[in-house]
Image (cartoon, rainbow, N blue to C red):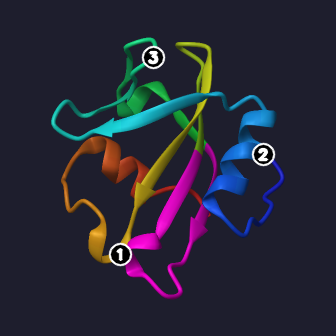
Amino acid sequence: MKHKSYDTVTEAMSDLKKLGYTTDFSILTDQECLVCHQTSTELSADDFEIDDFYRFEGDSDPGDEMIVYAISSEKFKMKGIVVNAYGIYAENASSAIVKKLNTHPR
């Protein structure tokens, strides 16, 4: 995927959905997985790859510091989006999922 830059999280998510990243995933650190609440699909750290990511700085509010990940799972034939905070509001977890997201390529 060719890396683009976006001004907002919403803009990045909208464009990724047009590129087929249509599933919204949430991080469940206690269960060590990503989950799609619509389908109840759970992905372990080994079940997905990070295709791209976009980092957003919170110029005026540290709570606005976010990373949007474009992920895909060959095993489940799914492509989706994970949004995660970083900086002072980021989860300080030892979860395998958080570790994988934090060691994204680039």
Few, some or many residues within 10 Å of mark 1 (<14, 14–19, 20+): some
Compared with 26, 47 (above or below) is above
Q: Residue type at mark 1? A: Gly
Specify which label sits upstream in the sequence, 3 or 2.
2
Task: Give the residue at mark 2.
Answer: 15
Verify whether residue 72 appears in magenta: no
Q: Earlier in the sequence, mark 2 or mark 1?
A: 2
**Which residue corresponds to the image point at 29% horizontal and 69% vertical from the top-left?**
89
Residue at x-position 45% and y-position 11% = 39
Estimate the spatial distance between the alpha carbons at disc 3 and disc 2, rounded to whole Å: 21 Å
Callout 3: few (<14), some (14-19), or many (20+) C-alpha neighbours within 10 Å?
few
Label 1 belongs to which residue? 87
Q: Secondary structure at mark 2?
A: helix
What label does residue 3 carry, if any?
none
Q: Bounds of the magenta span?
A: 51-69
Q: Nearer the viewer, residue 88 or 97?
A: 88
Label 3 and label 1: CA atoms lie apart by 29 Å
Q: Which secondary structure, mark 3?
A: loop
Residue extending furthest toward the bottom: 60
Q: How many marks?
A: 3
**To which quarter of the image does residue 46 belong?**
top left
Q: Nearer the viewer, residue 27 or 100?
A: 27
Give, as a three-letter code, the residue at label 2. Answer: Asp
Q: Is residue 99 left or right of residue 22?
A: left
Which residue is label 3 attached to?
38
